[in-house]
Image (cartoon, rainbow, N blue to C red):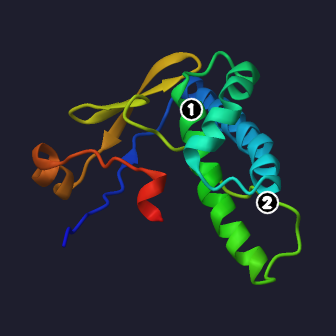
Amino acid sequence: MIIKRTVVLKSEKLPKKVFKIFVELEGMYREMLIQLLPYAVEDEVTSYVMLRVRNYDFLRGLYPQLPSHYSYTVCQDAVERVKGFLRKKRRGLVRKDYPEVRNISIWLDEKLFRLGYAFIRIATHKGWVEVPLEPHKHYWRYRNSWEVARYHAEDKA
């Protein structure tokens, strides 16, 4: 049995320039997700690898300025949303044709961020952006023993 702990860290107040970059990044991520969902539902693609193989070139063409790994993570995000949607659809609990995108949580894999001492660097369309963190007692206590969790869509099956 493996016990995992998730720690939420607040960031210091971001300068307007950095905040604007993250707003733009969220908009691009949302648009990529909105483009993928109808296709994934229509073809009932529940494999992250299949969705990525079929749509990687399309996503890279849509936003060539984004680091390529956003194409991977948006496919992982879309597959998780589609799996839940198709499960509900089989039970007759949804009336829409495909999932609605209400909330966005940008997925970052190990290539898109670097965890520093009291900051995190995130790869964006404008280069690497450093976000200072407001660490708490548990951050300092466990910082050296942490490992970055690797998420694999196939692990949830």
Tag of residue 100:
2
Q: Amino acid at mark 2?
A: Glu
Please determine whether, in this image, residue 142 is positioned above or below residue 22.
below
Determine the residue positioned at 72% across, 77% down: 88
Q: Quadrant of residue 95?
A: bottom right
Q: Residue at x 78, y 75 (%)?
A: 89
> Compared with residue 88, is residue 26 higher up or lower down, i.e. above or below?
above
x then y, percent, for residue 84: 65, 68
Q: Secondary structure at mark 2?
A: loop
* Residue 22, image quadrant: top right
Of residues 80 and 48, the one drawn nearer to the viewer in this rendering:
48
Crowding at label 1, few (<14), some or many (≥20) Cα neighbours within 10 Å?
many
Relative side of 92 to 12, left or right: right
Q: Check disc 1 and report the residue beneath it.
A: 70
Question: Which amino acid type is shown beneath numbered disc 1?
Answer: Tyr
How many numbered marks have been drawn onto this rendered protein structure?
A: 2
